[in-house]
Amino acid sequence: MALSACATGRAPRDPPPDFPEARRAEVVNSDHFRLWISQACLSGAESQLLLNELQTARGKILDRLGSARFPGDFRDSDGPPRKYRPFAAPAAVPDPIEVVVVPDKGRCHADAEGITLRADHVTRRDGTHELVHYLAGSSWRPLDEGLAVYLTEELWGAARGFTSKIRARVYLDLNLARPLRPQELERGMSRIDYDTAGAFVRWLIEARGSEKFWRLYHGAKGDYHSVYGQPEVELWEEFWRYVGNLDVRTKSAYYAYKVLLQD
């Protein structure tokens, strides 16, 4: 495998496990990140844009997480939970964070080794989405995916101009709304599920506070009652009432997204 290093001159180590075997790698080093680009699937300009996004997102995500960050900590959601300690020193962040970019079909994801991105998803801000997963550490669905959707929207704006709240309201009005049960999401999540999870996490943080959310995120799967003193079903009912009460009468994005889904 041919390796080339640029930007900082630091010697690259062996490729991360997600890098395809027997593939040519271009290694691009920068502050805090190392890109492993397979088969020249990104141009130099595209690589720089991705690094700019990741550099900006890293600082802002860490500011949001504070002591709730657990970089690279990917534990089984059914195992013993972490205990969120708000006054503990924040965990150290590995430097550099390894980022693999591949041209092949597959899914973008984060794990203990770093981040893997599809080249055709880079412009969708999937780098930020997966960086949230990596820096926050694993949790359970819908909280982990909801947090990544929420923070990506906070940092870069609504995807295609439709906020997760607007999307959730459209789903409600088109009878597509449902509570997201952890056990049902293990088999996969639809676009509706991702958008709903993002809106739900936003509501939990804005309505109930970030400290309670981090206790939930790093706690036992589905343990809403210990954190909020309410059962899961009751919280979902409150969330959908909130969505139903959103004033969308003058929101052009609401009508546009509704038409988009109905076409």
Image (cartoon, rainbow, N blue to C red):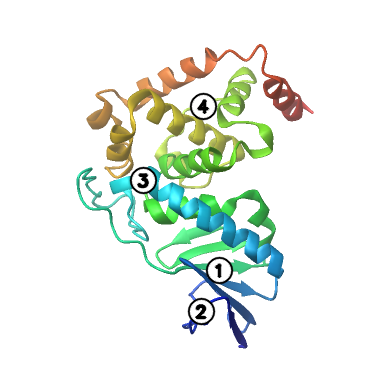
Q: Secondary structure at mark 1?
A: strand
Residue 102 relative to residue 187: left or right? right
Residue at image mark 1:
100
Camera-side mark, 4 or 2: 2
Residue at which label 4 appears: 178
Three-letter code, disc 4 = Arg
Q: Residue at x 65, y 20 (%)?
A: 174
Is residue 223 in view from this perspective?
A: no
Which amino acid, by three-letter code, is at mark 3? Answer: Leu
Task: Pick whichever of labels 3 and 1 is earlier in the sequence.
Answer: 3
Q: Is residue 168 visible?
A: yes
Residue 31, placed above or below residue 254 = below
Q: Earlier in the sequence, mark 2 or mark 1?
A: 2
Tell which residue pokes out farthest to the right in this image. 263
Labels 4 and 3: the sequence-earlier one: 3
Q: Position of residue 211 (x, y in %)?
A: 29, 35
Indicate which disc, 4 or 1, sits on the residue closer to the N terminus: 1
Under tag 4, what secondary structure?
A: loop
Is disc 3 placed on a helix, strand or loop?
A: helix
Give yes or no for contact between labels 2 and 1 (Cβ–Cβ under 8 Å): yes
Which quadrant holds the N terminus? bottom right
Which residue matches tag 2?
15
Answer few, some or many: residues within 10 Å of disc 2's Cα (few below 14, many 20 plus, some between 14 and 19).
Answer: some
